[in-house]
Image: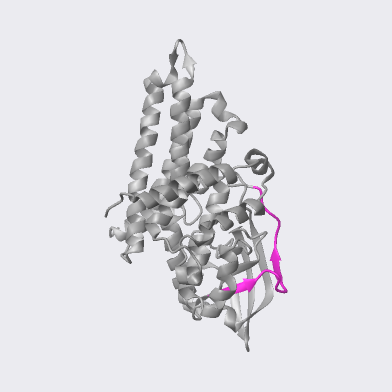
Amino acid sequence: MDFSWTEEQERLVGEVTEFARNELASDLVERDAQGSFSRDLWKRAADYGVLGWAVPVDQGGAGYDLVTTVRLLEALGEGCPDNGLTFGLGAQMWGVQTALLHFGTPEQVERFLPASMAGESLTAYCMTEEVSGSDAFGLEGTAIRDGDHYVLNAEKVLITFGPVADAAIVFAKTNPEAGRWGLSAFLVDANASGYTAHPVESKMGLRTVPFGKVSLRDVRVPKDQLLGKEGAGASIFTFSQGWERSLVLAPQLGAMQRQLDDCVQFARTRVRAGQSIGKHQAVSHRIADMKLRLETGRLLLYKTAWLQQNGRPNLMEAALTKTYLGECFRDSCLAAIAIHGGDGYKTAQGVERDLRDAIGGLIYGGTTDIQRNIVAGLLGL
């Protein structure tokens, strides 16, 4: 594995960082306080090409390989302090677009993918239910065949973009007796009769990306909107979540780099008792640990992306990456607050916002406890 970067890749990284810094950071304190999602910023990112980075050229995308895409998402996170926005972009790329590209019919891909890449349509990924959560396949929602349609009934919770999505990938049981092998996935229009998107729910962090409930009451879905084959829902979920788990935290590496640079600058210029606070070992060691977490996190993420890119098994690496990066970002946020002291506790500084956002990385896409269960199982425990 060679993780050196070409001149072209370095040029792209610099351009993405500058774009994100100049175009995707406006009014963040206000939007975070209000829990406001900006369609304008989403469209700016789409117009720049972010949502097409990993899409093949023959499908209208940039066709970047996964390691390059991960590096560009890292640059996006470094330049853009809006962790909710970068998380939302990753969720669309790895959850929704991956499922479409690998399981959708040509007609389904043509209908949903171009609008997704253009930022004109948002698609929610509706798996989680109140009764399931970490037991993903324990859901109760059903899809009963009725002639040329399926009738869906389900109550989905904690759905990214649920309150504002134009469409949804909905998982439901088509054969309840078959357990996980009786799950199927459907492409559902948000304007379908019986589909209800509930209001945005307030949450601790990632406030600039909307979460909420989606209810389906006798929603009739044409059979040609079945994604993949009937009974393939578990496979689709496992496949797309493997991609999301592996790659969705890439922008957090960029956020950690931005955080590290800010802490180094602060420690150099903040003077107490006649010397910069960076001369105090308690501060300098925290910064050294931030650098250590950043570099080791990079190696793990790049390896996971490389394995995915080359079609090699990476279930273990994906679980380790999800766990490690999530916890590294949290720990670096705590260190940044300690370094900044009272200033770090202020909303305007943005340091406390990073911490609130980081907590979400320990939960979404499978909690760190679930990831450790996966690792333990693969080790034969």
Residue sitting farthest toward the bottom: 147
Res. 141 in view:
no
Q: How is the image coloured?
A: one colour
The x, y position of residue 51, in whole percent, is 53, 60
Residue sitting farthest toward the right: 193
Q: Is residue 246 above or below residue 268?
A: below
Q: Is residue 104 above or below residue 149?
A: above
How many discs appear?
0
Is residue 263 or residue 76 the one in the foreground? 76
Is residue 12 or residue 224 the one in the foreground? 12
In this image, 376 relative to 194: left or right? Answer: left
The x, y position of residue 137, in whole percent, is 49, 67
Q: Is residue 42 above or below residue 264?
A: below
In the image, residue 193 lies in the stretch drawn in magenta: yes
The x, y position of residue 44, in whole percent, is 60, 53
Tell me the quarter of the image containing the C terminus: bottom left
In the image, residue 368 lies in the stretch drawn in magenta: no
Res. 35 in view:
yes
Tell me the quarter of the image containing the N terminus: bottom left
Is residue 83 or residue 333 the one in the foreground? 83
In this image, 174 relative to 329: left or right? Answer: right
The x, y position of residue 351, in whole percent, is 54, 34
- The magenta region covers 185-202
Is residue 308 or residue 313 the one in the foreground? 308
- The residue depicted at 59 percent of the width and 63 percent of the height is 118
- The residue depicted at 67 percent of the width and 66 percent of the height is 215
In this image, 238 relative to 217: left or right? Answer: left
In this image, 125 relative to 27: left or right? Answer: left
